[in-house]
Image (spheres, rainbow, N blue to C red):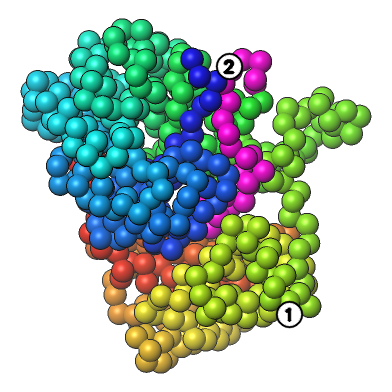
């Protein structure tokens, strides 16, 4: 058995299936470049047939990433596979990941197909995918609730048809670690040609067990794990890459394999995904949460000072903490700025984009003297998304006085035409959103509003996240500014633009 554990990152596909987490092509490319830098083996960049946007994002990722295999998901349908093959044409190394459901409930109720028909369709799909690439992955969807004899049958047939990776999904997050591990072990033992494929696990976190189930799979012979940054994904999410990788790396006394992941990028990619999607990382999240390495209790602090290992099983700096020293200030030049961002995985497609971001950096440096990596990341996310927006915030004036109504006057540029509106309500943010609503003239339902600080101190950038519902679709908007009312207005406008741009996108599993 190989001692290399393959990391298959599906942040850009399963992660994007979280309501409100949709990403633009440019955002996907930015994340993919950092995943490549971190030495992720396989990047699932999307579901090519879902929409033109998904197709183009996969194409763009395939064209820029050299060192990771680029993968597209496809149902076991000819048209899906052809679309995936087309999107992956420019990739240095490509994979098609095809799947069909195998549990009784899915076959009967969803597919309305017999088990024989399902096997036939799976085999046909793998053979068709082989016409585009040698690297073909097959997933029996809802394997965690499928009949084991049937799983053996379909896996043997798809390996015979050319599948080189067999992925076992716990699609609904139903399995328990010892049981999921036993399924993997038994499949590897029982399928006669199992040695011709790598076995993989793809776990969902509905019972909070995605990482535990994935680790159990590894202990029982799986040599690929499908995971996402920050555990982003459908419903309660997927296996979190950072937790899985660090568990295997930290407990080398237990695992007889390891990943190639360069763990020093973990924190910066976590922050990038969080700022792009607006999914905030909870403070007590393992590895990447703000408190993950913070020792509050006096007795712990005392122990750590005497000997770090008394209370620490990993080194914070190994995963990127404390690397956020003061990096740039108001006298820093364009080259230093560009170089620091390149280290954070951010490259600019054109001079205009670099110049815009540099101008924003100078404005920020005037207000805030110490600029940290987190500030730079927030600035880049905000500037890059604004470039393509049809509604832009031109200016905002807010008057607040205790005991009085608040007045917000907003100037928006809508399709390059400036318009002004004023609203009075009891709250400054509420008045700002009301004024924007009256200009944008679309029926939006605000579902969530949250404010957090990007770094420490009262001059820190405030980051506002909003979740908006428009015509049954959910989008997230983010805005950053040293002033939180302005950050709120930016977040709301960002969300409105996303809502207006949202196109219908097919869900792979419906
Ligand atoms: O959860 C799941 O079953 C999936 C498959 C498409 C692999 O995401
Ligand atoms: Zn999934």
Q: Residue furthest right?
A: 306
Is 225 within the magenta?
no
State the residue in front, 480 or 194. 194
Magenta residues, as a range?
251-276
Which residue is at a point 23% across and 20% down the rendered structure image? 160
Q: x%, y% of residue 184?
A: 38, 15
In this rendering, which labeled residue sits more in front, label 2 or label 1?
2
Residue wearing tag 2? 256
- Position of 497 with respect to 33 (left or right) is left
Q: Quadrant of residue 338?
A: bottom right
Asked whether residue 19 appears in the rendered view, the answer is no
Q: Is mark 1 within 8 Å of ligand 2?
A: no
- Position of 424 with respect to 508 (left or right) is right
Which residue is at a point 73% across and 55% down the rendered structure image? 324
- Position of 482 with respect to 213 (left or right) is right
Q: Residue 366 got which mark?
A: 1
Q: Are the residues flagged by discs 2 and 1 in contact, CB closer than 8 Å?
A: no
Q: Quadrant of residue 43?
A: top left
State the residue in front, 489 or 77. 77
Is 264 within the magenta?
yes
Residue 221 versus residue 208 in the image, above or below: above
């Amino acid at each position: 058995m190989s001692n290399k554990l393959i990391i298959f990152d599906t942040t850009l596909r399963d992660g994007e299936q979280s309501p409100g987490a949709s990403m633009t092509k440019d955002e996907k490319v930015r994340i993919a470049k950092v995943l490549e830098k971190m030495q992720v083996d396989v990047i699932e960049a999307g579901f090519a047939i879902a929409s033109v946007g998904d197709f183009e994002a996969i194409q763009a990722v395939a064209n820029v990433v050299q060192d990771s295999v680029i993968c597209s998901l496809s149902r076991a349908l000819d048209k899906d596979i052809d679309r995936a093959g087309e999107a992956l044409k420019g990739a240095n190394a490509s994979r098609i990941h095809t799947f069909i459901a195998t549990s009784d409930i899915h076959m009967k109720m969803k597919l309305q197909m017999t088990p024989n028909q399902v096997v036939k369709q799976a085999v046909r799909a793998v053979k068709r995918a082989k016409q585009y690439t040698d690297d073909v992955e097959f997933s029996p969807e809802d394997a965690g609730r499928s009949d084991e004899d049937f799983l053996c049958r379909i896996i043997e047939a798809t390996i015979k048809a050319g599948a080189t990776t067999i992925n076992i999904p716990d699609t609904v997050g139903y399995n328990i670690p010892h049981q999921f591990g036993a399924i993997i072990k038994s499949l590897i033992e029982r399928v006669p040609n199992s040695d011709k494929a790598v076995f993989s696990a793809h776990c969902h976190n509905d019972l909070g067990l995605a990482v535990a189930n994935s680790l159990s799979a590894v202990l029982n012979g799986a040599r690929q794990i499908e995971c996402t940054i920050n555990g982003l994904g459908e419903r309660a999410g997927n296996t979190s890459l950072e937790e899985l990788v660090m568990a295997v790396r930290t407990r080398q006394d237990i695992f007889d394999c390891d990943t190639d992941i360069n763990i020093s990028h973990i924190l910066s990619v976590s922050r990038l995904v969080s700022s792009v999607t607006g999914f905030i990382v909870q403070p007590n999240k393992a590895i990447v949460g703000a408190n993950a390495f913070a020792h509050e209790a006096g007795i712990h602090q005392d122990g750590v000072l005497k000997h770090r290992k008394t209370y620490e099983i990993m080194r914070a700096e190994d995963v990127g903490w404390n690397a956020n020293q003061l990096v740039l200030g108001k006298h820093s030049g364009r080259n230093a700025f560009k170089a620091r961002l390149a280290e954070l995985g951010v490259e600019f497609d054109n001079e205009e984009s670099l110049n815009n971001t540099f101008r924003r950096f100078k404005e920020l440096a005037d207000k805030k003297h110490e600029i940290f990596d987190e500030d730079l990341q927030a600035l880049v996310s905000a500037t890059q998304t604004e470039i393509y927006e049809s509604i832009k915030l031109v200016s905002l004036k807010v008057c607040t006085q205790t005991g009085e109504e608040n007045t917000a006057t907003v100037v928006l540029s809508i399709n390059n035409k400036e318009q002004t509106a004023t609203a009075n309500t009891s709250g400054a943010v509420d008045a700002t959103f009301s004024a924007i609503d009256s200009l944008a003239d679309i029926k939006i339902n605000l579902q969530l509003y949250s404010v957090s600080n990007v770094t420490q101190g009262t001059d820190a950038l405030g980051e506002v996240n909003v979740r908006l519902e428009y015509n049954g679709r959910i989008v997230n908007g983010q805005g950053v500014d040293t002033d939180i009312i302005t950050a709120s207005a930016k977040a709301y406008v960002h969300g409105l633009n996303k809502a207006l741009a949202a196109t219908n996108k097919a869900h792979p599993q419906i």
